[in-house]
Amino acid sequence: DTAVSQTPKYLVTQMGNDKSIKCEQNLGHDTMYWYKQDSKKFLKIMFSYNNKELIINETVPNRFSPKSPDKAHLNLHINSLELGDSAVYFCASTWLQGGTEAFFGQGTRLTVV
Amino acid sequence: DQQVKQNSPSLSVQEGRISILNCDYTNSMFDYFLWYKKYPAEGPTFLISISSIKDKNEDGRFTVFLNKSAKHLSLHIVPSQPGDSAVYFCAASASGNTPLVFGKGTRLSVIA
């Protein structure tokens, strides 16, 4: 019974396409994140949602649009994919109050060709 | 601007010996620190954490030390086991609504 699940695990697509990555958590957490791990292996925060509301949006192109239909789901839609979008994207969830760990999904490896 | 730095990209240790992974941070607002372990093709998994009100936290073979004045923390694994081979990420957050800020990771190889 996976705590944070992402689909798909692998995604290969052509430049210019639009794609979505889905994330669901069954931990009852109120906050969900999207992180990007690029070729340099840094894990960088992209978005943070609390109870379906966007609370943090780092410097991310507006081709990336997160959507949270409810507090257990946070999907990531990417328009007009570019080669530089190739990375591993991780979803995570936690409680908003500081001092708690975040739980991560298995990651989605996106390859844009 | 790296707020959390892991300056050693890799570390090799013999089985049974101690592994020491280091992490430095620059943001004095950080008050909660965590270590995550990551295997290939998996997401990071939480290992151990420490609050800024403590200087040590121990959980089995894993101990995290925090030196606030030096803005430095370290993870000690003793004894090291081959199954500990993974990438270890240091992370930090500030009180309230702040997501974790990660270091670049250190790849630990435990040699049998």
Image (cartoon, rainbow, N blue to C red):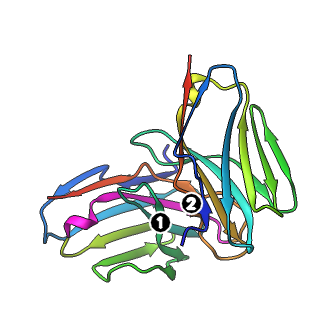
Q: Residue at x 65, y 57 (%)?
A: A101
> Which range is magenta?
A82-96
Report helix, strand or loop for mark 2.
Answer: strand
Q: Amino acid at mark 1?
A: Lys
Subunit of label 2 = B
> Pointer 2 and pointer 1: residues touching (CB < 8 Å)?
yes
Residue B53 quadrant: bottom right
Residue at 71% in and 43% down: B75
| Side of B8 where A43 appears, left or right | left
Percent x, y for residue B96? 70, 76
Which of the 4 quarters of the picture holds residue B58?
A: top right
Q: What's under tag 2, amino acid-wise?
A: Phe
Q: Is residue A49 magenta?
A: no
The residue at which mark 1 appears reads as A44
Callout 2 environment at 10 Å: few (<14), some (14 to 19), or many (20+)? many
**Label at residue B102:** 2
